[in-house]
Image (spheres, rainbow, N blue to C red):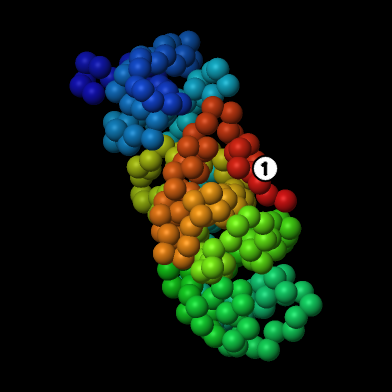
Amino acid sequence: MGADERPNNQGGCIAIRSFPPPSISRCTIGGSTTTSDDATCGSPRWIGKSLSCVCIKRKGNYERICMTLTPLQEERLQRLKHRMKVYFDPSRRDHQEALKALWHAAYPDQELEGLISDQWKEMGWQGRDPSTDFRGAGFISLENLLFFAKAFSTSFQRLLNKKGGKRATWEYPFAVAGVNITFMIMQMLDLQSTKPRTFVRAVFVQMLSEDEWAFDLLYCVAFVVMDRQWLEKNASYMDFNEVLRSTRMQLERELLLDDVMRIEDMPSYSLLS
């Protein structure tokens, strides 16, 4: 966009259509109207244009999405970023207790023999010591699994025990899949970057205003979406990465739908129980 094309409204807002193809869109904020055909949903082209806000059409109206965060958004975003930086430390008591809590949530009637045990393979860890599988996503991936187990126990147990649908002979390992889902969401939201580079991130940060646990809820949605995609594709172990990619694409599409203001508004949220 050239200097003569930059919107001259005070809010510095550019209109972005909810769906392609690109077309001229109008955004009225503060009594002034902006027009632009230089940006489309999911495109990072509006980044770095010195814009303080962008607009997305939702429920027939344009909603203002601002890059300047509110104090609440900033606080919750920083807290989430801190969680994402915590490595799993098998020597920390709180990390040990979280791992034990996950076991008891998964198998309430089965006593855990120890933090290093062949029992962990039942849950889908790669070996006797689950702490070695957290390297990619850190402690937050354990927190995500534990949140899933407690908030949506029926769905958690269904996926853990591979109930429903025609299952492959070589299924995805539940726990390791969970760690990979956490890592996928971290990449999709790009929260560790200094400046936003995707519109999905901007929308998600807005959702933090509604619910501090938006990341954990999104994780639960992602897990059930991944499992459904797995079944629909008749996938086997070697197809896991492809299923994960298609899961990410579906999440991105749903986050940018007109009427999705919270994680609970995503169509796939209804898969949880």
Residue beneath label 1, please? 270
Q: Amino acid at mark 1?
A: Ser
SS state under label 1: helix
State the image coordinates of residue 231 (x, y, percent, origin top left). 55, 53
Q: Residues within 10 Å of mark 1 (few under 14, many from 20)?
A: few
**How far across and how far down the image is residue 164, in percent?**
67, 56
Viewer-proximal residue among 153 and 140: 153
Q: Residue at x 36, y 23 (%)?
A: 21
Up/down of 223 relative to 6, above or below = below
Residue 114 in view here? yes
Using the image, determine if residue 266 lies above or below residue 31. below
Instruction: Work out which residue is located at the far right of the displayed protein and give it.
Output: 109
- In front here: 261 or 2? 261
The image quadrant that residue 108 belongs to is: bottom right
Residue 94 is at least partly visible in this image = no
Q: Does 38 sit above or below residue 111? A: above
Using the image as rendered, state which of residue 124 and residue 130 is in the foreground: 124
In the rendered view, does 264 fall on the left or right side of 36? right
User: What residue is rendered at 48% in x and 10% in y?
Assistant: 31
Q: Is residue 43 left or right of residue 123?
A: left
